Image (spheres, rainbow, N blue to C red):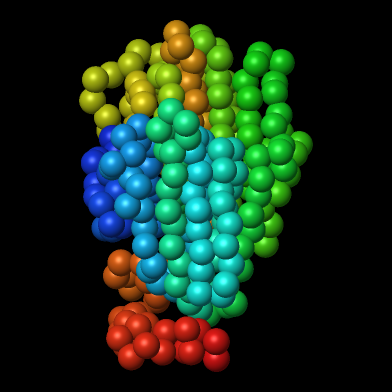
Amino acid sequence: MSIRPVKNLIKSRPTLEGAGVHLRRAFGFGNTSDFDPFLLLDDFRNDVPAEYLAGFPWHPHRGIETITYVLAGKVEHGDSMGNRGSIDSGDIQWMTAGRGIIHQEMPKGDPQGRMHGFQLWANLPASKKMTAPRYQEIKAPEIPIVTDDDGTEARIVCGNFWGKKGPVEGIATDPTYIDVTVPPGRRKTLPVETTSHAFAYVFAGSGKFSNASGPQPVPTETAQGIKAVEVDNRSLVLFDSGDEVTVEAGPEGIRFLLVSGRPLQEPVAWHGPIVMNTQAELRQAFEDLNRGTFLDAAAK
């Protein structure tokens, strides 16, 4: 067994998206090859309704999947196929845009005004870019929760973990998406598929990720090959190769998303909400949009 060393530590940055939604971006819109097959992770936790209610009005997607996980509040959505619905606290929506869809996502706060959640973008392989759009809507009670003897809890959205299988199925890159909570002071080693790229995004508490067993000094710098790195809220840890990650929770515990997937290693042509493999494919998608034939082209 080999513990994955920490390759990079990233603090999410304030970003404006949609019609003026204030959120934090952990990664995206740049060289995302280290995260392949994932393209972007947004943390849209906000307690000020004026900073999120404008939402994400009608916009297109092609060539990707968007994964929305709501912790508090809800996201009302609709699309060009006539679908309407709501993603509520604890729910997941895994949308495969495929050959093309136009949709909107409008966040609504809970009674305390909180709108908390995440959106992850995953790339589609060239063979699936023009597949038919589909949704996998997963309600909170459908997500299996496994609790280990030491109190560590894992909500398994996608993939196999600790003998349980998440409800999201049929994803080409064989991803794993887990919401992990480790109790205060506990040290936990978690399995990660060797051939996958992997990252953890911390959204509550603090702790440290190590690349060797046993107590380790925690350096102030972050560089490949370090013994351990301290993390707190809105920290993203990108891991190098190995088959497990080790985390030690701080005095208030730690909660994080643990995400991994098999890299596609394909060329990426990306502009805004559309991700293809070549510039010619990208130009064609935007020509379809400009001509008003985006959905006609998607239906062929």
User: Residue 224 sits in which quadrant?
Assistant: top left
Q: Residue at x 28, y 41 (%)?
A: 50
Quick check: 265 above or below 86? below
Indicate left or right for 3 with 224 as reference.
right
Residue 246 at x, y percent in the picture: 51, 25
Residue name at image x 47 percent, y 84 percent = 295
Q: The N terminus lies in which quarter of the figure? A: top right
- Nearest the viewer among 214 and 59 is 59
Please state which of residues 117 and 120 is positioned toward the viewer in this rendering. Answer: 117
Q: Is residue 52 left or right of residue 138?
A: left
Q: Position of residue 170 (x, y in %)?
A: 67, 62
Residue 293 image point, x, y percent: 41, 89
Where residue 34 appears, as percent x and y from the top left, is: 37, 51
Is residue 116 something that shows in the picture?
A: no
How many dots with numbers? 0
Q: Is residue 155 above or below residue 128?
A: above
**Is residue 111 positioned above or below 248 on the image?**
below
Q: Residue at x 43, y 62 (%)?
A: 104
- Position of the C terminus by quadrant: bottom right
Residue beneath the point at 56% across and 52% down? 86
